[in-house]
Amino acid sequence: MRARRGRGILPGFRLSLGTSLLYLALLVLVPLAGVALRGATSSWEDIWRAATSARALASFRLSFLASLGAGAANAAGGLLIAWVLVRYRFAGRSVLDALVDVPFALPTAVAGLALTAVYSAEGWVGRWLAPLGIRVAYAPAGVWLAMTFVGLPFVVRTVQPVLAEMDTHLEEAAAVLGAGRLQAFSRVIFPTILPAVLTGFTLAVARALGEYGSIVFISGNLPLRTEIAPLLIVARLEQYDYAGATALALVLLLASFALLFATNVLQRWSVRRLGPAPG
Amino acid sequence: MTFGEPLATLPSLRHSGVTEPAPVRWLLVSAAAAFLGLFVLVPLLAVFATALRAGLGRYAGAILHPDARSAIRLTLLTAAIVVPVNALFGIAAGWAIANFRFRGKRLLITFIDLPFSVSPVIAGLALVLIFGRQGWLGGWLDARQIRIVFAVPGVVLATAFVTVPYVAREVLAVVEAQGNDEETAALTLGAGGWQILSRITLPKMRWGLLYGIALCNARAMGEFGAVSVVSGHVRGETITLPLHAQILYDQYDAVGAFAVASLLALLALFTLVTKKYVESRSRPA
């Protein structure tokens, strides 16, 4: 067997890597590079003007604030769900576990329809919120709700394995040394799972920022009020304003890459702290 | 705690030291259940409740309508093309990443995840910029009367873009956990590459592969944002199931929209059952 310069001894390196790279390049990288190149063909002023119009700024503000809010809700809720699923045994545990994956498997348009039905003023939950003056559907809160829904699995599924693998000896030591549960959590458990929580948070924010399908149903799509950035891209495209759509897309792409980079840094931090992730 | 306590009491201390009092446990479980109930379970139930609100007859009528049937056909066709191709990609990428050391491996994994973090709308925009009438290849395609954007090929490409990571991710999780000792052993016993793939690697990753395919299928059939941009909404031609649900909803036919949506929700539930099955089969390694 010919040694392949320390690569590994199994055959099929060129074939498997070649097809993967070619497919990924043609389907994903070239089209995305196309968006960047298209942006490069317009002048700086045009891009700047398209990306900083009042409508664009309002959409970016809503997109970024709502996705950060959804990420925060998922960090808190996801940590709670992961904790309960890993640490306690109770009736209906496997149902809760299955529910976590619903946003991953449920088409976003279905999620949008469902959330609108439940949280509109006549809906099952919305009718209880309406007398309190809380509007969810057709308001910015609806955008946040849909974003929280689509990002739900990320924090749970990144925190869950870390919690499960965590050695309880440290907690026992903390207890023996006189720490209460709250103290043990904040001093021992939380620092250990923090990288996983932050990774899940970043993934959830990235997912929420690009989300479109569920939000178009629930937000009402009012320019300046409940219009998210991906929706404004679609609106520009429908007016054949390709340069305007591209300018907005570039801003979103930059944000996505920044979040992707942050995820990678966080994962490396997590590996350094805990050793390679199990599974 | 005083010194000199008999060691026998330690196990009970241990026990109380790493869990919470029962009321706290109960409170936390209730809060988690409320979160998932309000955000996930209630909306899921609402899909079926709304779809069946006007009776089974209306439900069946909405699903069997010619427009719905053509949407189902296109959705099935798209999935039938996209899922196998993305599954092959997932297997190839899994083989390359698990069995070889090469520069840029981390970058490759990041690129596989890229469609997760890029907005589906941007995926659609990219296809329009390349294949659209004013796109780079627009003139060339126009001259040959090939239509990609606002036609079925665009729908397929957009769906493929968005669902690239699903199979690859599940396959990678399996191969990274299990390593390639068995493959290496097979090689030293004289097996060829394809033999190793079909006799060892594929059986080894079959459960991850199965769930990845189920998930990829659910996302492919349910993709909305990217498809919506490139579809052009040509009635009876480029309308997929999710787009059809939206059209009905915009025409104030809520029951029809939810009936169509309920098909996709059933698909999602089927996917989750597959996951549970896969987990139960793959736990005792």
Image (cartoon, grey):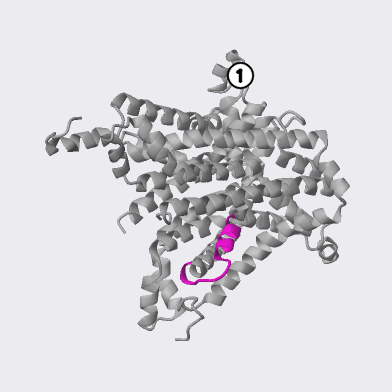
Residue at image mark 1: A134
Q: Which residues are magenta?
A: B98-113
Answer yes or no: is residue A106 visible: yes
Closer to us: B71 or B33: B33
Q: Position of residue A26 (x, y in %)?
A: 68, 65
Q: Position of residue B251 (x, y in %)?
A: 70, 32
Judge whether residue A163 is colored magenta: no
Q: Residue at x 46, y 40 (%)?
A: A100
- Furthest-bottom residue in this view: A1
Badge 1: few (under 14), some or many (20 or more) residues near its Cα, within 10 Å? some
SS of the residue under disc 1:
loop
Closer to us: A240 or A57: A57
> From the viewer's perspective, is residue B121 above or below residue A36?
above
Magenta segment's dominant SS is helix
Answer yes or no: is residue A216 visible: no
- Residue A222 found in image quarter: top right
- Residue A181 found in image quarter: top left
Q: Quadrant of the N terminus of chain B?
A: top left
